[in-house]
């Protein structure tokens, strides 16, 4: 492994000097510097990155404040009165939660302010050393930026000139270890529960837990700790490393279980605020699919930068959807056709009567407004139509699976010439899940407490 402790970034104190004259960048942590250069490219420049982080802070603040007000400050007994009053909570836990939200927001704001200098340094690097302006950064290809990076003098002192592969490897050093762990099935990712031990679970929180525990324990900066390397040949040192890692998992599991109720409420409110309008206008969006977190690691290739990988997944989305749509539950289709006919007739009848009777939409049936029946019927109709296949569908799953493979580069031997079987479809659906399934896993705290419990159980 290349030791990256040989460079140092010498930056002027004055921001105006940073943006005026080019200089040589001697990097003490070349891996970290190149990752910051790459993240700056993905963030599309200084203004976009800062604005994005500010609005992320405001989004969290809005959801948290909205949740606290709805749960504790509104006096629901006065909702029928006009105006209703706000109730000042006396529960100390509520004020403790408010204090925690305030501290978190202040901490994030201070972190952003401290990071601004580092962003200005990267902006100076792009402007002075690479000759790339903020406007050019919006459309330039990463490959063009890499050609300029490898021409920067004295960027790396371990070799005369970096190559594009060197840059990708340094940016992806830690991610490459995670890819290896997933591809070699070192992490089973299975729930240690009866009837669920065949289901492989990986979520964002699990990824964060692995990064925080394994890599913070194994790496010092961008290099593997000496004691971890020593553990390969020293059984006593190996035991020490294992015990230390086990303690980290247990602490993280305890903290995760304490925070999971608050994260549950936050995620629920965030989902309602973000997708509520979409679900009301397009109920069939519940049937949309996405690549699971497991698929994102199974399909990932070594030294493949995230934006290239995302492009590959986007190209695979259409053939993957076509493959899943090949498998039809004909009983469900028959039921859906009948229900869609009933709901469609209700919608047509309401609009037809409303054309002749202006006050129809103000009337009620069985205590419910006509608009309520119209909304429910329209939503059910949209869901049913999402289930009913096109009449011109041709059954050719092998073709669509092969098309998806061209972009995912993932096709186990057990799938060959068996694309039409329920077993292959089930395995593929584990990688290409419904979007609502991913959220439900998070909402039911599989994304936090269960994931952490899996880690703890795996090491106990």
Image: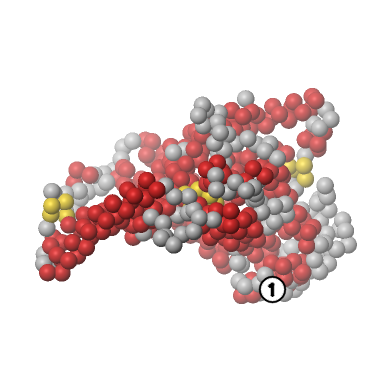
For residue 219, above or below residue 344? above
**Classed neighbour count for the residue bearing mark 1: other residues with Cα under 10 Å, few (<14), some (14–19), many (≥20):** some
Q: Quadrant of residue 459?
A: top right
Please give left or right for residue 343 compared with residue 95 in the image: left
Asked whether residue 81 is in view, the answer is no
Q: Residue at x 29, y 45 (%)?
A: 73
* Residue 276 percent across, percent down from the top left: 36, 54
Q: Quadrant of the C terminus?
A: top right
Residue bearing the label numbered 1: 132
Measured as percent of width and height from the top left, residue 371 is found at 20, 58
Q: Position of residue 16 (x, y in %)?
A: 67, 71
Up/down of 250 relative to 98, above or below? above
- The image quadrant of residue 453 is top right
The number of callouts visible is 1
Residue for point 82% across, 47% down: 1
Name the residue rendered at 13%, 60% in the picture: 362
- Relative to the observer, which residue lies in front, 365 or 218? 365
Q: Nearer the viewer, residue 116 or 260?
A: 260
> Along the line of sight, which residue is nearer the eye, 183 or 42?
183
Q: Secondary structure at mark 1?
A: loop
Q: Position of residue 456 (x, y in %)?
A: 59, 30
What residue lies at 55% left-to-right and 44% top-to-bottom? 421
The answer to whether residue 355 of the structure is visible from this angle is: yes
According to the image, what is the colour scheme of the structure? secondary structure
């Amino acid at each position: 492994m290349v030791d990256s402790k040989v460079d140092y970034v010498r930056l002027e104190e004055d921001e105006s000097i940073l943006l005026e004259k080019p200089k040589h960048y001697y990097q003490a942590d070349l891996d970290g510097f190149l990752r910051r250069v790459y993240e700056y490219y993905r963030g599309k420049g200084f203004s976009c990155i800062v604005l994005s982080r500010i609005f992320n802070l405001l989004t969290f603040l809005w959801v948290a404040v909205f949740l606290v007000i709805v749960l504790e400050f509104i006096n629901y007994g006065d909702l029928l009165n006009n105006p209703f009053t706000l109730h000042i909570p006396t529960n100390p836990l509520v004020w403790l939660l408010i204090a925690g939200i305030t501290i978190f927001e202040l901490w994030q704001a201070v972190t952003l302010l401290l990071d601004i200098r580092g962003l200005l340094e990267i902006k100076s690097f792009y402007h002075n050393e690479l000759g790339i302006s903020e406007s050019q950064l919006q459309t330039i290809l990463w490959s063009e930026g890499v050609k300029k990076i490898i021409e920067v003098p004295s960027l790396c002192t371990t070799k005369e000139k970096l190559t594009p592969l060197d840059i990708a490897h340094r940016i992806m050093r830690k991610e490459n270890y995670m890819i290896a762990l997933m591809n070699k099935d070192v992490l089973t990712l299975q729930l240690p529960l009866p009837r669920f031990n065949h289901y492989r679970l990986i979520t964002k929180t699990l990824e964060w837990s692995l990064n925080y525990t394994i890599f913070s324990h194994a790496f010092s900066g961008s290099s593997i700790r000496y004691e971890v390397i020593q553990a390969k040949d020293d059984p006593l040192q190996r035991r020490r490393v294992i015990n230390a890692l086990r303690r980290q998992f247990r602490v993280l599991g305890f903290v995760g279980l304490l925070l999971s109720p608050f994260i549950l409420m936050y995620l629920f409110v965030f989902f309602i605020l973000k997708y509520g309008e979409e679900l009301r206008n397009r109920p069939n969006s519940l049937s949309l699919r996405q690549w699971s977190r497991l698929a994102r690691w199974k399909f990932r290739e070594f030294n493949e930068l995230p934006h290239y990988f995302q492009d590959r997944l986007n190209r695979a989305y259409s053939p993957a959807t076509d493959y899943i749509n090949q498998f039809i539950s004909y009983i469900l289709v028959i039921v859906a056709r009948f229900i869609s006919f009933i709901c469609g007739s209700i919608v047509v009848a309401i609009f037809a009567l409303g054309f002749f009777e202006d006050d129809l939409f103000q009337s009620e049936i069985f205590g419910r407004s006509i608009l309520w029946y119209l909304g429910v019927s329209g939503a059910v109709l949209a869901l049913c139509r999402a289930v009913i296949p096109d009449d011109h569908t041709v059954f050719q799953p092998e073709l669509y699976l092969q098309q998806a493979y061209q972009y995912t580069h993932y096709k186990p031997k057990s799938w060959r010439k068996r694309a039409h079987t329920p077993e292959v479809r089930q395995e593929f659906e584990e990688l290409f899940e419904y979007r609502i399934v991913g959220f439900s896993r998070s909402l039911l705290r599989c994304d936090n407490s269960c994931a952490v419990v899996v880690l703890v159980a795996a090491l106990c």
